[in-house]
Image: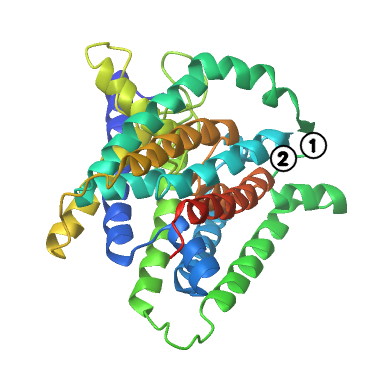
Amino acid sequence: MPTSAELASITQTVVAYGLLIGIAFGGISQATRFCTLGAVSDWLVMGNSHRLRMWLVAMASAIIATQGLIVLAGLDATATFYTSPRLLWLSNIAGGIAFGIGMALASGCGVRTLVRVGEGNLKGIVVFLVMALAALMTLRGLTAVWRTQTLDQVFLTLPSRSDMPSLLGWVLSIDSTGLRLAIALGLGLLLLLLALRPVKGQKQWWAMAGSIGIGLLIAAGWASTGILGFVEEHPDTLTSAFVGTNSRSPESLTFVGPLGFSLELLLYWSDRSQVLSFAIASVVGISLGALASALLRKQFRLVGFQSIQDLGNHMVGAVLMGVGGVVAMGCTIGHGLSGISMLSLGSLISLLAIGFGIAVGIKILERQTPRV
C-alpha cells in the first residue's frame, strides 16, 4: 500500500503525463491540420480524402497500440466505461448527431477549438466557454436532469462487455484474449491498407507519420492513467483505485467533459475539492502545443467573428457540442480514437452518428451561403 506522499507523487506524475501528451497532440494537430470536420468536409465537398485517411491511420495505430497494452501490459479494459455491458444506444445516436451538427456550425470539435485558441483564434475562446458551460449543465445541471430522465433510460444490457472481442468471445464461447489480438491486428492493418493506398496528388507522408503519433498518444493516455495511475490498495479505501483522473477509472484523451472540468476549476480555484487531473492537464497541453507549433510555423494570428451570423453559428454549435458530447459520453477524439481503440461498440455507434451529424451541419451551412 503506498503512503500518502507516494500516492500524491503518482497522481502528480499522471497529471504531468496528461500535460505532455496534450502538448504533443496539440503540436501535431496544428502542424498537420489533423481535424475530423476538415476530414469529412474535404471528402464530401471537394472529394479530397487526404485528411480522412489521416484519421484512419491514427485510428489504426491507436487500436493496435492500445490492444497491445491490454494483452501484453495488463491494462484493464473492463475498468473503463467504454466497455460497459450497459449500451446506451439512443444516447450514443442522439448525442452523436447533435455533436456532429454542432461541430459543423462551430468550425470544429473540442480539440480543434483548443488548437484554434493556441493559434490566436478568438472564436475558439468563445466556443470553449460556451461548450464548457453546456457540458457542465449536462453533467450536473438542468440538462443533466433531462438527460438522465429521458435518453439514459433507454439502453440494452449486453451479455458481456460491450467491446467487440468480448462480444465475439461470448458468441463463440471462447476466451477473448486471442480474439482481441487478432481483431486488433486485422482491423488495424485493414485501416492502414485503406489509408496508405496510393492516391494521386496526396503524398504528404509526414502528415501520415504525425497521425501514427496521434494514435500512439491515445495509447500513452491509457498507459498513464490505467497502468501508471493504478494502485492496488488505496490508503483511504483499502481497495484498488486509479488516481489522477476525474472518473476514478482509466482515461485517455477526450474533450467535452474535460472542458467543463477545466472551467469548473477556474471558477472554483480556491475550493480544495477542485484539483488538477489528467484530463484538465491535457486540455491545457493541447493549446500550449498548438501555440508552440503556430509560433514556429509563423501561423499565429488573431482572428475574430466575421458577422453576427458567424457568432450565432458558433454559439449554437458550441451548445450542441457540449450537450451532445455529454449525452453521447464522448466526442470525435473520445469515441473516435480513445473509445475505438478499446474496440467499443458504443463508440462505433457514436462515431457513425457524429459523421451523419457533420453531413447535416454542412448542408445547413451550405443553405446559409448566398448563391451567386
Label 2: few (<14), some (14–19) or many (≥20) C-alpha neighbours in 10 Å: many
- Identify the residue at horizontal 31%, vertical 25% (top origin): 263
- Residue 161 is left or right of residue 105, and the answer is right
SS at mark 1? loop
The residue tagged 2 is 161
- Asked whether the beta carbons under mark 2 and mark 1 sit within 8 Å of each other, the answer is yes
Distance from Cα at disc 2 to Cα at disc 1: 7 Å
The residue type indicated by label 1 comes to Leu
The residue tagged 1 is 158
Depth check: give the residue in front, 276 or 36: 36
- Identify the residue at horizontal 22%, vertical 45% (top origin): 304
Screen quadrant of the C terminus: bottom left
Where's residue 110, x and y in %?
A: 40, 43
SS at mark 2? loop
**Nearest-to-viewer mark from 2 and 1:** 1
The residue type indicated by label 2 comes to Arg
Where's residue 72, x and y in %?
A: 55, 55
Residue 37 versus residue 111 in the image, above or below: below
Screen quadrant of the N terminus: top left
Say whether residue 248 is visible: yes
Where's residue 20, x and y in %?
A: 27, 47
Residue 317 versus residue 298 in the image, above or below: above
Where's residue 103, x and y in %?
A: 47, 46
Say whether residue 16 is visible: no
